[in-house]
Image (tube, rainbow, N blue to C red):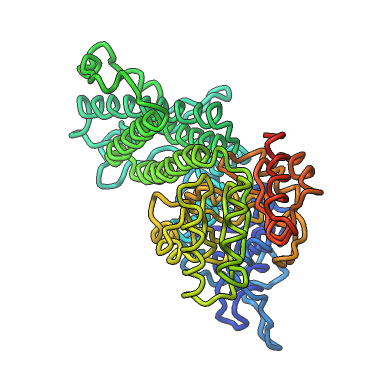
């Protein structure tokens, strides 16, 4: 691999190797490289990670197998030389080798000899098609946007398109030319063989221009809805980033060439209109239609890009995959908000000492107007828990009170419950959904803003947010508290229930933090008069809704 490393990148590799196996054959792995970047805290790569909420704790939480190596006496890492002029790179795992190669391939127009800084190492991890890249994307670290930022920092303009060796003609491949600080780009299609010149070039450009316009139009409709219709900051930011990434990719199709190929007046499709295209039967249909428009346009762009730029086609494919996730997230956020529009008080119950005791409690809470009841009991055997769940279902059927089973998606289905609630260590939203189906609710506990954002993308119907205060029913090592309630209220419109130690006395603090839905256990279930306690809390919620 013909490249050099800056001193900061060299130190990063040394840090990373310290998290590898304690022998002379140790390899730097991709997760260890993330830790190496974070340990070189003053470098730009670490600063980028910090901006996206990636810290050492997050890396170790996702890759708990990472351990600092305890090296035997006389065994030193291969790159541990303090003389930076004689730095010997360590062994790289396949993931890291792929990442560095991916970065180098995108740096053909950088000065030689090629020197990789910490931001280039991070960039390589983000663009290589490996697990770490997917994890970075889940933290909203977008490879296309990162590339633009790095190029701007290093004053490197968009790279020239190279002619594949087998497609070269006698005409040299055009390059970027700089004049007075402005950049002009010759057509990338000029690099194609003679058989693809003239009309084929023009037709391809015309198709891609039309598809690009459709993609951006559909994307704008969707972004406007989540921004103004849902008032959802998190999804609006996701769409904004997606739009920015798409713009960067479309910039690789020269704008003057696109305009030259555009011919709206001669477009035979402008006169072909179906009646169904002139109306929308509600918001759901509007969203589905524009997601379909966006995805179909991206697929057209992707296929036609394969003619002259396979790298561009691959990146368009990744954007298309992101739209599928956003499609689900937007529709579930909208439908979840509708289905739980009037649900503000969520009460968690155990199975009680007897079926009779549970029946009395459930009846009183249903009469008092509790919106959601969750059965959560880790002590009961499966048969008893299922019997209790069926009892709660019978008592809530036909009422406005929804019934949720904690953790056990299988028992939720057998009891015909309205849904299941899972934690961060239980079934994933995907697996729970596979069991309970599309119609039932799937809720998930979240303890950080990152987990809340991920729950939206995972397709949860609602989230629990907390713990807010210490609770007598469940112990937690830490409390994200009211700050998490504020963060979720500011960003996310998926129904969110604040949970953890909430009672009538501290309810006002939750409401002041922006929470409008609460999940409560002992303050109601263990009260002398559970129905009265529920009614009092519901009254306060109603006054602030």
Query: Residue at the spot x=29%, y=33% of the render?
Result: 171
The C terminus, quarter of image: top right
Name the foreground residue: 213 vs 101.
213
Q: Image check: 87 left or right of 458?
A: right
x and y, in percent, of residue 319 in the image: 42, 42
Q: Nearer the viewer, residue 176 or 488?
A: 488
Q: Is residue 468 above or below residue 261?
A: below
In this view, 514 is above or below 179:
below
Q: Is residue 489 above or below residue 460?
A: above
Q: Give the quadrant of residue 379.
A: bottom right
Q: Residue at x 53, y 34 (%)?
A: 240
Where is residue 79 drawn, in percent x and y? 63, 72
Q: Which one is in front, 234 or 265? A: 234
Horizontally, residue 265 falls left or right of residue 485, namely: left
Tell me the residue at 55%/69% (across/down): 355
- Asked whether the viewer can see residue 104, the reply is no
What percent of the width, then of the height, locates residue 463? 58, 50
Residue sticking out furthest to the top? 265
Residue 492 lies in quadrant: top right
Residue, x 47% and y 49% (percent of image)? 459
Q: Is residue 386 visible?
A: yes
């Amino acid at each position: 691999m013909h490249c050099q490393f800056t001193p900061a990148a060299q130190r990063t590799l040394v840090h990373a190797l310290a998290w590898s196996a304690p022998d002379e054959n140790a390899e730097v792995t991709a997760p260890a490289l993330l830790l190496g970047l974070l340990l070189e805290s003053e470098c730009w790569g670490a600063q980028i990670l910090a901006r996206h909420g990636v810290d050492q704790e997050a890396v170790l939480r996702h890759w708990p197998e990472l351990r600092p190596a305890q090296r035997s006496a006389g065994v030193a890492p291969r790159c541990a030389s303090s003389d930076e002029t004689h730095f010997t790179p360590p062994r790289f795992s396949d993931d890291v080798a792929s990442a560095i190669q991916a970065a180098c391939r995108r740096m053909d127009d950088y000065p030689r000899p090629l020197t990789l800084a910490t931001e280039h190492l991070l960039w390589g991890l983000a663009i290589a098609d490996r697990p770490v890249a997917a994890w970075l994307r889940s933290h909203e670290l977008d490879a296309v946007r990162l590339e633009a930022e790095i190029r701007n920092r290093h004053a490197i303009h968009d790279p020239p398109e190279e002619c594949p060796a087998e497609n070269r003609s006698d005409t040299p491949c055009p390059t970027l030319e700089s004049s007075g600080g402005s950049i002009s780009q010759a057509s990338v299609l000029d690099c194609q063989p003679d058989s693809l010149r003239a009309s084929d070039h023009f037709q391809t450009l015309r198709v891609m221009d039309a598809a690009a316009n459709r993609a951006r139009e559909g994307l704008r409709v969707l972004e406007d809805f989540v921004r103004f219709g849902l008032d959802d900051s998190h999804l609006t930011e996701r769409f904004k980033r997606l739009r920015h990434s798409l713009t960067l990719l479309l910039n690789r199709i020269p704008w003057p060439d696109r305009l030259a190929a555009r011919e709206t007046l001669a477009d035979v499709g402008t006169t072909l209109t179906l009646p169904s295209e002139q109306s929308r039967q509600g918001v759901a249909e509007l969203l589905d239609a524009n997601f379909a428009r966006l995805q179909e346009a991206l697929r057209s762009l992707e296929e036609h890009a394969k003619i002259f730029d396979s790298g561009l086609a691959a990146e368009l494919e990744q954007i298309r995959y992101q739209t599928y996730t956003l499609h689900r997230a937007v529709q579930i956020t909208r439908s979840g908000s509708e289905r739980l529009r009037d649900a503000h008080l969520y009460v968690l119950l155990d199975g009680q000492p007897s079926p009779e005791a549970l029946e009395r409690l459930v009846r009183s809470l249903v009469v008092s107007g509790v919106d959601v009841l969750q059965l959560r009991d880790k002590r009961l055997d499966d048969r008893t828990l299922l019997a209790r769940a069926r009892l709660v279902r019978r008592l809530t059927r036909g009422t406005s009170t929804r019934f949720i089973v904690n953790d056990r998606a299988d028992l939720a289905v057998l009891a015909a419950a309205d849904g299941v609630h899972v934690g961060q260590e239980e079934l994933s939203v995907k697996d729970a959904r596979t069991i309970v189906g599309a119609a039932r609710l799937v809720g998930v506990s979240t303890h950080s803003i990152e987990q809340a954002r991920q729950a939206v993308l995972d397709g949860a119907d609602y989230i629990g947010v907390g713990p807010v205060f210490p609770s007598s029913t469940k112990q937690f090592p830490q409390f994200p508290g009211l700050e998490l309630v504020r963060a979720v209220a500011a960003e996310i419109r998926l129904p969110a229930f604040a949970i953890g130690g909430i009672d009538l006395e501290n309810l006002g603090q939750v409401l002041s933090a922006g929470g409008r839905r609460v999940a409560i256990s002992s303050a109601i279930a263990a009260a002398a008069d559970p129905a009265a306690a529920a009614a009092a809390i519901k009254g306060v919620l109603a006054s602030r809704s």
